[in-house]
Amino acid sequence: MYKYHCLNPISDAGISRFSEDYQETALEDSDVILVRSANMHEMQLPDNIKAIARAGAGVNNIPLDVCTKKGVVVFNTPGANANGVKEMVIAGMLLASRDIVGGIEWVEKQGNASDIGKLAEKQKKQFAGCEISGKKLGIIGLGAIGVLVANAATHLGMEVYGYDPYISVDAAWNLSRTIHHINDLETIYRECDYITIHVPLTDGTRKMINEEAIRHMKEGVVLLNFARDLLVDEEVLVEALKEGKVKKYVTDFANPTVAGTQGTLVTPHLGASTEESEDNCARMAVQELRDYLEHGNIKNSVNYPNCDGGICVDAGRITLNHKNIPNMISQFAKVLGDAGVNISDMTNKSKGDYAYTMIDVSTSIPESVVESLREIEDVYKVRIVKGE
């Protein structure tokens, strides 16, 4: 029986995909954790935890270094909420272009005025804006969300520029051929009327939209941020809004710096807050956990390499989370060889400083072998997956 624990409410569309071999239980008894936004940085992870699945893309709420050194594989669900975020970005561009919010607020203030129709005709000019068709949109980051935004914007008549030096093959295939795929950010800053950011938060991207970047942008640019607030130096941005350099800042991250500031449209983290997105993320997260627990396969991990050995058809499968250093494989082979355990297949994958090894064996695996493997220095976790 496998055991799981949910730190946040997780959609039944995902939970229902656990088989009868799974049981929800307390954290200290669980094999895996499902999480959305709960902060795990101060949490003491029990040694029995084997994996964590984040029902969403960002993993800033998870202590990756701690998890990795404990051999805990952390999954996310890239692309599962992409359509929900894409629709918010398109809505954000429209709201920034036409003062729809201002117009709605004006009507509400009129109450039941009998002459509201005539008043509206006189006042509507102050809410007039521009159309997005024919304008240039710059997209920084062409992952699952960026590609959907790019393709949708072209259908709305926009000229789209995309920047991503690490674009995946799948993303490239899905990108409309009308998109201008460019190699430098300055072209986007210089040419585009609208700029939207879709990159992960790393040390290299933190406050990438800074004073210098804004200085290179067009006068009256509209900036959209549905990725992470820390990608933008928002104190500098507020000054740019006051000066008119930036016309509007549309962000999904409410904080004291931008909330209520003139020229900002701030939503309360609604990007992926749709029933469909939550269902999709939950389904993907549960599938990732099941594939890992039942077969040892890793897909969409942020701290360990992807590794797919399919279904084990031998006597058993040994999986090892370990440091990516020389001589590890030979040590594993020696332990197995000394115990008379025959290796039928082996896969080793690495990701930075860490690695994952999957060994299928055609003979039974004594507990003494498992203990010997665990005693090897820089081995973080050893698991046995039963064969068919």
Image: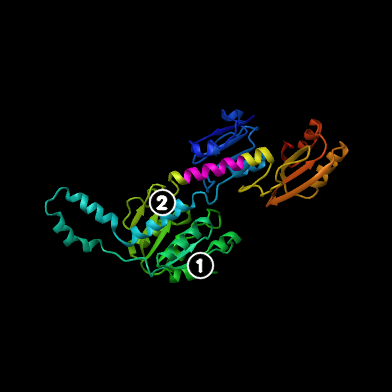
> In this picture, is 211 found above or below 325?
below
Crowding near pointer 2: few (<14 within 10 Å), some, many (20+)?
many
Query: Which badge, 1 or 2, is on the more N-terminal residue?
Result: 1
Residue 280: within the magenta?
yes
Which residue was labeled with disc 2?
Answer: 252
Taking the image as shown, residue 203 lies to the left or right of residue 234, namely right
Cα separation between marks 1 and 2: 23 Å
Is residue 10 among what the camera can see? no
Residue 373: within the magenta?
no
Q: Amino acid at mark 1?
A: Leu
Q: Quadrant of the C terminus?
A: top right
Q: Residue 203 appears at what percent x and percent y?
A: 56, 54
Q: Residue 50 appears at what percent x and percent y?
A: 64, 37
Residue 338 picture quarter: top right
Which residues lie in the magenta part?
277-289
> Where residue 32 is drawn, which disc sits there?
none
Dominant SS type (magenta): helix
Which residue was labeled with disc 1?
Answer: 185
Taking the image as shown, residue 360 lies to the left or right of residue 27, namely right
Q: Secondary structure at mark 1?
A: helix
Q: Amino acid at mark 2?
A: Asp
**How are the colours assigned in the image?**
rainbow
Taking the image as shown, residue 145 lies to the left or right of residue 331, namely left
Q: Quadrant of the N terminus?
A: top right
Q: Looking at the image, which residue is at 52% across and 41% down?
A: 282
